Image: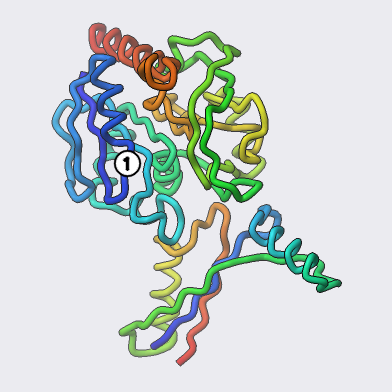
Amino acid sequence: MKARIEVMLKDGVLDPQGEAVARALGSLGFEGVGGVRQGKLIELDLAAGDAEAARAEARRMCEALLANTVIETYRVEIVE
Amino acid sequence: MRAAVVVFPGSNCDRDLAVALRAAGFDVTPIWHKETDLPPGTDLVGVPGGFSFGDYLRCGAIAARAPIVPALAAHVKSGGYAIGICNGFQILLETGLLPGALMRNARLKFICRDAPLQVATAQCAFTSAFAAGEAISLPVAHHDGNYRADPETLTALRAEDRIAFAYAEDVNGSAEGIAGILSANRRVLGLMPHPERAADPALGGADGARLFAGLASELAAETATA
């Protein structure tokens, strides 16, 4: 099974990188960018036999290492 | 007094920390991160600066899951002393032994310079050689030193007098100007500035040496009364 994990900063946590990207887009002439948040995408190749087991395992991995839940949220998607 | 300095792949301040601790009177043993025990009788664990595991994933994230960490956590839980400097501070936050997180500096630049600091409390062994409110200077060298915590944590840190050092000017965007914090039992210090790089007057000042000397004399006094 393949899992795709999206890790993003929590709402309300200032994202200096996202802000710099927003400014760069503005200086390139892209108007109407209300905000930019930058996160991480992590793909896992898992041995789990079914989607539910893969999802549960991926969530445990997020809690243990992949996300810092003090400042980040994560979302697990099983893609195949 | 015995100190152990944990060494990870990518640590680069471990030897400087060992030199500064030895100068203050500690017996220092370096401990590779794959060990699972601290040397018997360890009074202080040093978690040094550097770029452990290449800062992959998040600064300190992988080091915080290293085999030595349960021994460090047990040492802290039983009332042992620990100091985490720069990447070591990031590691202590990732282990959950101190609260909060360190994010990319507000202006996104790696900052490498002497930073003016205020000693925010003298009520711990680490700052016992200073006066509360005293202005000192220590070098900083980091990309991710922007301290963040939820409002409850910040309130608790303030109310419990657990902010050890604060920047005297905005350096990296840290909440409340926090440069270093203490654990609830005041025996674990995490800080971004490098006291070990200011441990010799010929090489960058001596304010850091005062931290280690104060810590050593407090520990010696504690051992003598124990």
Most distant residue in the left direction? B40
Left or right side of B99 for B159: right
Q: Which residue is mark 1?
A: B12
Q: Residue sitting at 58 percent across and 43 percent down?
A: B146
Query: Quick one: quadrant of the N terminus of chain B?
Result: top left
Other-residue count near label 1 (Cα within 10 Å), few / some / many at <14 / 14–19 / ≥20: some
Kindly tell me whether residue B101 is visible in this rendering: no
Horizontal side of B52 relative to B30 (left or right) equals right
Q: Is residue B77 left or right of residue B164?
A: left
Residue B51 in the image, given as x and y percentages of width and height? 38, 48
Image height of B132 relative to A51, above or below? above
Residue, far right: A32
Residue B199 to residue B142: above or below: above
Foreground of the two, A9 or B11: B11
Residue A14 appears in the picture as rendered: yes
Give me the residue at 19% from left, 37% from top.
B38
Residue toward you, B160 or B103? B103
Nearest to the observer: residue A50 or residue B216 = B216
**SS label for mark 1:** loop
Residue B132, by quadrant, is top right
Q: Position of residue B22 (x, y in %)?
A: 23, 20
Q: Quadrant of residue B186?
A: top left
In the drawing, does residue B153 fall left or right of residue B26?
right
Using the rendered view, name the quadrant where residue B18 is placed.
Answer: top left
User: Residue at 73% of width from left, 64% of height from top?
Assistant: A24
Q: Amino acid at mark 1?
A: Asn
- Residue B73 coordinates in the image, percent (x, y): 31, 40
Q: In the depicted view, which residue is nearer to us: B127 or B161?
A: B127
Q: Give residue B2's position: percent from left, percent from top.
A: 20, 23
In the image, farthest residue toward the front: B202
